[in-house]
Amino acid sequence: MIPDFQSAMLPILQKLSDNKIYDSSGIRFYIIEQFSITDEEQLQKTPNGKQFLLFNRVAWSISYLRTAGLIYSPQRGRYQISDIGKKLLKNPPSKITIKFLKGINSENIAASPKSKEINGDGESGESIEKTPDEMMEEGLERINYELSRMLLKNLEEISPTKFEKIVVDLLIKMGYGGSDFENGEVTQKSADEGIDGIIKEDKLGLDKIYIQAKRWKQESSKIGRPEIQKFVGALDGQRAKKGVFITTALFSKEATEYAEKTNFAIVLIDGKRLTKLMIDYEVGITIKDIYKIGKIDTDYFIEE
């Protein structure tokens, strides 16, 4: 099991007690062995899916130990125990926590850390299991979840024509049609023949993407195989090979399997994926706030 970043701090300091210099990968390998972390667990990601959870937690453990002066970085990406760290290990606490680190300095380190950890005022820090990155990412995930629900409700309440226009706008903003809105159009109802929109991939319109947009009010409803077969028939009628079927609902297993096996290149986008793409490409939303997240430039502080 991957330990929380506080639980990893004491083992990391103990690993560095041999006074050798270790890089991040060596420290991670030690934590993997100490906590019997499986191969599957090593592949776990943080909420946004951009970082390995183990890497993130070990990095924060190292960062807190450095800030407290228990370890230092003699060169970029490498770490060694400090004199304060050595002194601490002569009378170590049962666990190093954020609260414990806040009370550390070179004068009082020889005092009993264990009593300091238990009797200090405020929270002990034991309850903090997630790194700041994890908490921030989970907060953003919750915000986007609610935003996605609100987007879906709005999509269910608009007219079919407006929905088709939004779908075309989204694909253009995603880069199709050279990101030129003039290369996307919603077809006329009298002659759409099962095609709701068209995007020209080149200036002459020699290569096109055909779009079907189904706005269903019931999120639990599923688009079945017959609907996909009709779309394939419409593509064949246009002598086309590329199509995108977008809905506010879901696709049945049979529909998904059929789309994967057909000779046409068909992409299925359900309501959940649709709203995620709208958030990612800022379609139908405005950005409320932008927060800058800083990270220490370790190179800047290394003396030549």
Image (spheres, rainbow, N blue to C red):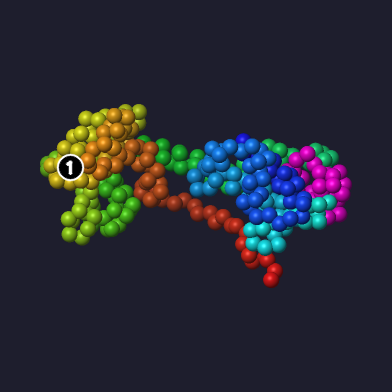
Circle 1 residues within 10 Å: few <14, some 14–19, many ≥20: many
Q: Residue at x 23, y 46 (%)?
A: 242
Q: Nearer the viewer, residue 21 or 204?
A: 21
Which SS class for mark 1?
helix
**Residue 203 location, x and y as percent?**
20, 60
Q: Is residue 161 magenta?
A: no
Q: Nearer the viewer, residue 188 or 267?
A: 267
**Residue 271 location, x and y as percent?**
35, 37
* Residue 289 in sight in this render: yes
**Residues shaded magenta:** 88-113
Q: Nearer the viewer, residue 117 or 62?
A: 62
Instruction: Name the quadrant of the N terminus.
Output: top right
Q: Is residue 111 magenta?
A: yes
**Residue 256 location, x and y as percent?**
30, 34
Residue at mark 1: 235
Q: Residue at x 26, y 42 (%)?
A: 266
- 1 displayed left or right of 16: left
**Residue 297 location, x and y as percent?**
62, 62
Q: Residue at x 16, y 37 (%)?
A: 233
Instruction: Residue lying at the far bottom in this picture: please name it.
Output: 304
- 51 displayed left or right of 62: left
Predominant SS along the magenta part = loop
Amino acid residing under circle 1: Leu
Figure quadrant of residue 129 = top right
User: How many numbered markers are drawn?
Assistant: 1
Q: Residue at x 50, y 40 (%)?
A: 142
- 50 displayed left or right of 182: right
Instruction: Name the quadrant of the C terminus.
Output: bottom right
Figure quadrant of residue 249 = top left
- 147 displayed left or right of 240: right
* Residue 185 in sight in this render: no
